[in-house]
Image: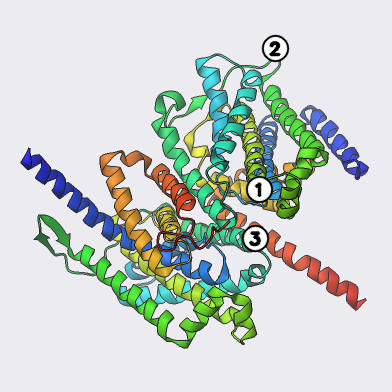
Amino acid sequence: MSERPWLLGASALLVIALIALPLAIQGFWLYSLGLCFANGLGVLAVTFLVRYAGEVSIGHSFFVAAGAYTVAIADRSFGLSALVSVWPAIALGVLLGIGFAFPSRKLSGIYLAVTTMALALALPELILQAGPWTGGFEGLYVSRELLPGVPKPLQQYYFALAALVVATAMLGRFRQSRQGLALLTARSHPAAAEAFGVGRDWARVSAMGISGGLGAASGAALAFTSSTVSPNSFTLWTSIFLLVGSVVSVYGLTLGRALLGGAFVTLVPQLLAGSGDWIPILYGVALLAVILAGHYLPRWRAAGRSAS
Amino acid sequence: MSFNLLRTGGDLLSLIWAGTVAGCLYALGALGLVMIFKCSRVVNFSHGNVAGLAAFLVYGFSTGSLLQLSWGSAVLLALVIIVALAALTYALIAPLIFESELTSTIATLGIGLIAQGIIQLLFGADIVSMDLPIPNWHMTMLGQRITSYDLTILAATGVIVTGLFLVIDKTRLGIAFRAVSANPFAAEICGLSLRSVHVFAWVVAAALGVTAALLIVPTTFLSSTTVSSFMLQAFAAAVVGGFSSLPGTVLGGIVVGILVNLFSFYVSPEFSNTFLLCVILVTLNIFPNGLLERGTGSRV
C-alpha cells in the first residue's frame, strides 16, 4: 500500500462516504448495501485464493455457511450477539479451510476446482441432516441486537461495513507482510520459495485457511445483516456467483473492488427480481465478457501502440 | 438364517446390477468431460447444463411446446443445435485455452450459466416426464428384475464406447486426438491442427452429453436441474478414472455407480454427495492418476 498512496486516500474517502451514507438513504437500499458489504467479503475470500494460491474455488458457500450458522446458533442457543460470535465464526472458517486444504493439498488447478464443487454440493445435505442445530429447511433467525438503543437497520449496515473495511485494511497490510510475500513467492516461484523454506503444502494450507476465515466473516455479516440463515442461500450457485463477483471485480483485493464484486452479486438479482430467469444469463454473459476483455484488451492496446 | 443370507445376497446383487446400469450413465457423462480435458486441458463445467438443455429441447420439439416432430427427428434437431452450440462455445473460449486452462475453465462456468438461463427462460419451472420410445418389457434372471430400459442403457453404452474406441484407435482423426493429448507441442510441430482436434473433442463430448441426458431422464423427471445434478457423479467417475483415460472413465463410472448404490442402501441415502466428495478426495490422494494407472508420478 505504501507504493500507492492514492489508493489509500481513495479508500479512506470511500470509507467516509459509506459511513455518512445512512444520512441520505434508508430502508431497502440501506439493507441492500449491507448485503453488498457482506457478499463483498465472500468475493474477497474467493479472490484471495486466486491471488495468493492461484486456485479457483466454486465451493466457498461452505465457509460462508459455516460463519453464518455459527452466528445464528450462538444467537439462538447461547444468547451471544454477532459482535461476540463473529470471532469463533472466523476461527471455525479458518479451521475448516485448513481441514479441507489438508487432504486436498496435493491437488491443483482443475482437480481442486472439482473437489470444491463436490464440497458445495455436499453442503446442503449436511445442513439439512444437522436439523436440530441448523433448523433444517426453515433455517434460523438472528435477532439479538449489538447495541441497545441504536436502530436495527443501522446496526446491520455498520456491522457489515466494519467487517468489510477491517478485512480490506488487513489484506492491504498482508500484501506487505512476510507471510503475504512468502505465499506469493510460493505461488509464482515454487522452487525459489522451497529454497527459502516455504513449502508448497504449507502455502496452500495457509492460503485456504485465510480464505476460509474471510468466507466465514462474510457469512457472519450476512447472517446478522439479513437476520435469517437458511440452506437455500448456500447452494452451488451461491459459490459460482461469488466466483462471478470475483471475476467481475478483476480479482481485486481493495475496498472498491470488493464493493464492486459484492454489488454485482447482490444487486443484480434484486434489480432483476421481476425477471429472475435472466439472472443466470446475465451472470454468464458478464463472466465471459470480463474474461474475454481481460484476454483481448491488452492485445488491442499493444496493437494500437505499435500502429501509432 | 440362510434365508436372511440369501436375501442379503439378493439385495447385494440387485444393488450391484442397478449400480452398474446407473454407472454406465455416469460413464457416458464423464466420457464427454474426459474427451475435452484430455486434449485441451479444460474442465467443461457447462457439460451438465448444456446436456440438460438438450433434453429440454428434445421434449420441446417432440411434444409441441416448441415444434411438433417425431421423437427421432426431435433428437436429431436437438443434436444438431447442441453440436453447433459446442462448436460455438469452443470458438468463443479457444483463445483462452492457449493462455490459461484455469481461465478457460472459469469461462465454461459462464457458458453453463447461460445454458441454465435459457432452460429457465424457455421452460420455466416445468417438471415433465419423458420416456424413451422403447417397448415396456422386463424379465427375471437370478431373482433379478431386468427391464428393457436397463438393457437399452447397457447396449447404448456398449455401442457408443466401442464406436468411440474404434474411432480413436483406428482413424486418422483418432490418432491426431491421441497425439494432441500426449503432447500438444510436438503434435503441432508435426503439422496437426490443435484446433480441429479440439473441435472434434468438443463436438463428440456434446453428442455424448445429449445421449446421456436422454438416457438419464426416464429414471426421474425432467426439471431444470435434473441433468446437471448428475454432474457430480460424472465428475467423480472421471476422477476415479484418472480424468484422462477413456477406459478408466468407463470403469470409474461403474465403480462410482455401484459404490453410491451400496452406500445409499447400507449407510444413508441422505449423504450421497458427501460420500462422493470423500470418494473424490480419497481417490485423488491414493490414486492420483486414476485406478488404471499407478506409479507414473503424481499429478500436482
Quadrant the C terminus of chain A occupies: bottom right
Q: CA distance from mark 2 to mark 1?
A: 50 Å
Q: Which residue is mark 3?
A: B103
N-terminal label among 2 and 1? 2
Q: Quadrant of residue A163?
A: top right
Quadrant the N terminus of chain A occupies: top right
Tell me the number on the disc at residue A149. Answer: 2
Q: In front of the other: label 3 or label 2?
A: 3
Q: Residue at x 64, y 18 (%)?
A: A84
Q: Which residue is mark 1?
A: A200
* Residue A157 in picture, x, y percent from top left: 70, 28
**Amino acid on which the number 1 mark rests in the picture:** Arg
Q: Residue at x 50, y 63 (%)?
A: B296
User: Which SS class for mark 2?
Assistant: loop
Q: In front of the other: label 3 or label 1?
A: 1
* Residue B135 in picture, x, y percent from top left: 17, 69
Q: Residue at x 64, y 57 (%)?
A: A287
The one of A158 and A218 positioned closer to us in this rendering: A218
User: Which SS class for mark 3?
Assistant: helix
Instruction: Verify CB contact (< 8 Å) between mark 3 and mark 2.
Output: no
